[in-house]
Image (cartoon, coloured by chain):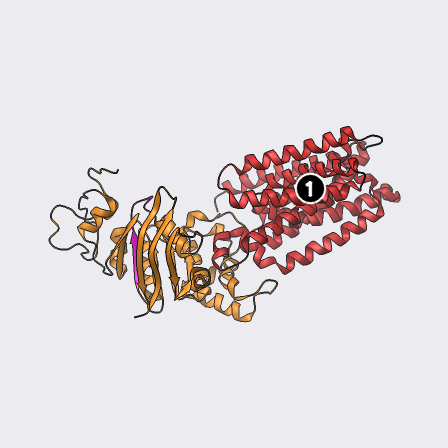
Amino acid sequence: MDTDISLQHIWAGYPKTPVLEDINLSVKSQDFIGLIGPNGGGKTTLLKVLLGLITPQQGRVEILGRPVAQGRKYIGYVPQLLELDRNFPIQVKDVVNMGRLGKRKLFHRYNQKDREIVRRSLDQVGMSDLEDRPIGDLSGGERQRVYIARALASEPKILLLDEPTANVDSRIRNSIYELLQKLNKYMTIVMISHDIGAISSYVKTVGCLNRRLYYHNDKQITPRMIEQTYQCPVDLIAHSIPHRIFPEHNDEVAAIAHGYSGECNHD
Amino acid sequence: MIEALQFEFMRNAVTAGILVSIACGIIGTFVVVNRIVFISGGIAHAAYGGIGLGYYFQFNPVWGAIVFALISALGMGWVEQNTKQRNDTLIGVMWAIGMAVGVILIDITEGYKAGLESYLFGSILAVPRGDLMMMFIFDLCIGILITLLYKELLAISFDPVYATTRNLPVEALYLLLVGLIALTVVMVMQIVGLIMVIALLTIPAAIAGQWQQEIKQMMLLASILGIIFTLIGLWLSYAFDLTSGATIILVSGCAYLLSLTLKMFGDRQPA
């Protein structure tokens, strides 16, 4: 299978305190990868490296075999809800129009084709009826769908989502994951999340990130990955996880659905 | 009001008010949604340094103001884009230094010089016809430029990070925007003074932002509100013999408080 994203020996952050240490990752085409990890573990930094917003100190990033600045136009980026001003005076369709920015040159207006693609993208996320609404009037889940539609409007090969289910309730969370599963039929998805329990029932592979990346091109989260990532033993809290993600033999270290408890010795 | 219009200076003042309000409505909308009112204030005060320079070296102070406004705008814009912390401090420093340079240069200039006050409050009642023509052309240029770059300016205002990932020249566009703000500040300052520039840039756009949910409509409403405030202010200042600039600002300020109260009251009602 083709490799969509390739990270080789990436170091990023500050020279004396790297946030990312020697990250190696290759994301295959049509993968649905969930990246989990504690706050401050470098999830946001990794995302910025993938979008070319920061240049790593060392290492190589390639997106579809191209350097980031060219490759990123194939990435549909869906930011965290909190990063955007919900009081900004703008309508849903104008937000989604921005997905077409890279396709039209400066001084040119959006054309008929752009409008059709925007309409289709809104359709895909089930938001066509609300296209004339100001975004300030939408719920968190609806706004999240609008940003997914904006990403789709750029006709991406890869969808990159930053905590798409933070600040939405569980019913909406599941509907967003189901939407992503549908989209995964024809595009690669990289999702950053803190929501290990839910992530594992929808994604194809899981990586744990805490400065270093633990990734085995596999869906299973091993106790060792958790231990390395969170640097502490974790109690099992088995909430509504549709199917097991932890191997049968987990005896001392185990799983988390909503975070972790127990004694941690962070250094 | 009608009898006042028989005077040419009054007709010019009304025309000036309309032209200035249009520029401020359009540019002020971007100032308000980008939350860069402070930068605009900094530009307006730093421009005074250029005016001092013009007096001291005996060239037209307007050119000095344009150069100082543009340099400080680009400097502040760059600081805003490239520093994460304390950029308000740096902008505040540029604001103060620009003003002080102007005051000192005017101090040491020999002979006749216009006082600080004429630049602070302007004189909308003494606008020469030539300035009106300039302002009309300036409005036209702003209108054309904003129309051509509308989708880009909207994108960098709403979500600059996303715009960067689409390979838009975000920083260049942002500097273009603050450059436009600088030119607007100088053009409008000549006519109505420094303090009224800030009032006309922010108040009508802020009120429009409370009621409109789209940038284009916000610009339209802000321009209309600006015109209404200037006309009411001019009429009041004529009727009660008050300083015109300050009266216009007070009318705008009262309207803002009224709008804010109405908005808060309206939001409390069950939907």
Residue B137 lies in the magenta-colored region: no
Q: Position of residue B15 (x, y in %)?
A: 79, 47
Residue segment shown in magenta: A32-41
Foreground residue among B184 and A197: B184
Q: Nearer the viewer, residue A138 or B105?
A: B105
The residue to which callout 1 is attached is B68
Give the structural element (helix, strand or loop) at label 1: helix
Location of residue A53 in the rendering, given as x and y in whole percent from the top left corner: 45, 53
* Horizontal side, residue A29 vs residue A228: left or right: right
Does A92 sit left or right of B255 as displayed? left
Q: Colour of chain B?
A: red
Q: Chain of mark 1?
A: B
Q: Residue A63's x, y, as percent?
A: 39, 63
Is residue A34 magenta-colored?
Answer: yes
* Residue B179 horizontal side relative to residue A236, left or right: right
Q: Which chain is orange?
A: A
Quick check: A60 left or right of B152?
Answer: left
Quadrant of the rendered structure where residue B243 is?
top right
Q: Residue at x 33, y 49 (%)?
A: A20
**Residue B21 location in percent, x, y?**
71, 47
In this view, the residue in front, A203 or A243, is: A203
**Number of residues whose C-alpha sits closer than 10 Å to that of mark 1, classed few (under 14), some (14–19) or many (20 or more):** many
Question: In the rendered image, which quarter contains the N terminus of chain B?
Answer: top right
